[in-house]
Amino acid sequence: MSAEHEPVEHPSITRFRAELVRRGGAGRIVVLPDSVHTAALAAQALGCEVGAIANSLLFDTDSSPLLILTSGAHRVDTAAVADRIGTGPLRRARPEFVREHTGQVIGGVSPFDHPAPVPTYIDPWLRRHEVIWAAAGHPAAVFSTTYAELVAMTGAAEVEVD
């Protein structure tokens, strides 16, 4: 196949790839079909458990962002997490807030590669999986990593989310 027929990588994936390398990430990036828009569908496409999908959920805490990396098998109890980390109420971030603070869109928010650092917490449940999959800056892209590598790349603190 000639170079002119090779698919062009989306710029957000290219940026994420460079940041992954800069942070020492060893995982691979996979672009999934557009129809894979939930943790369950991503897990099915990747051949892994839904719990191995790390959802990047951005919350608004009095106009400040807070990112929680949670297992696809969990829902975040926002009141309990706010109490555990000592912050104000956690509200689901609006799409504009997500874009402003991450440079990415809902469904494609990566654990890092944001315009400015975002305080990040991680669900210790993810530690149960040898390989974790997280968004790679685009709704159709994910990357593989390990719990230890993800913590090292993000500086995330552990918090029980449910």
Image (tube, grey):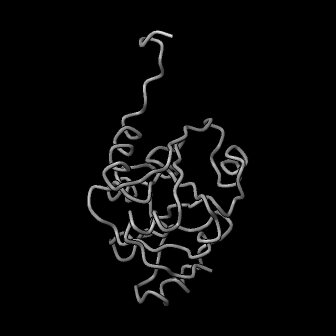
Image point (43%, 24%), residue name: 8
Q: Is residue 153 left or right of residue 92?
A: left
* Front-lying residue, 72 or 79: 72
Percent x, y for residue 16?
38, 46
Counting from the top left corner in percent of width and height, residue 68 is at: 48, 70
**Which corner quadrant of the image does residue 55 belong to?**
bottom right
Along the line of sight, the residue nearer the viewer: 44 or 109 = 44
The image quadrant of residue 31 is top right
Residue closer to the observer: 97 or 36: 36
Residue 34 point in image, percent of width and height: 61, 36
Vertical arrangement, residue 6 with respect to residue 106, above or below: above
Q: Is residue 5 left or right of residue 130?
A: left
Count of labels shown? Answer: 0
Question: In the figure, 142 relative to 94: above or below?
Answer: above
- 57 left or right of 64 in image: right
The C terminus sits in image quarter: bottom right
> In the rendered image of this protein, does residue 46 appear above or below residue 83?
above
Residue 76 position, x and y percent, is 59, 74
Which residue sits at x=51%, y=10%? 1
Residue at x-position 30% and y-position 51%? 22
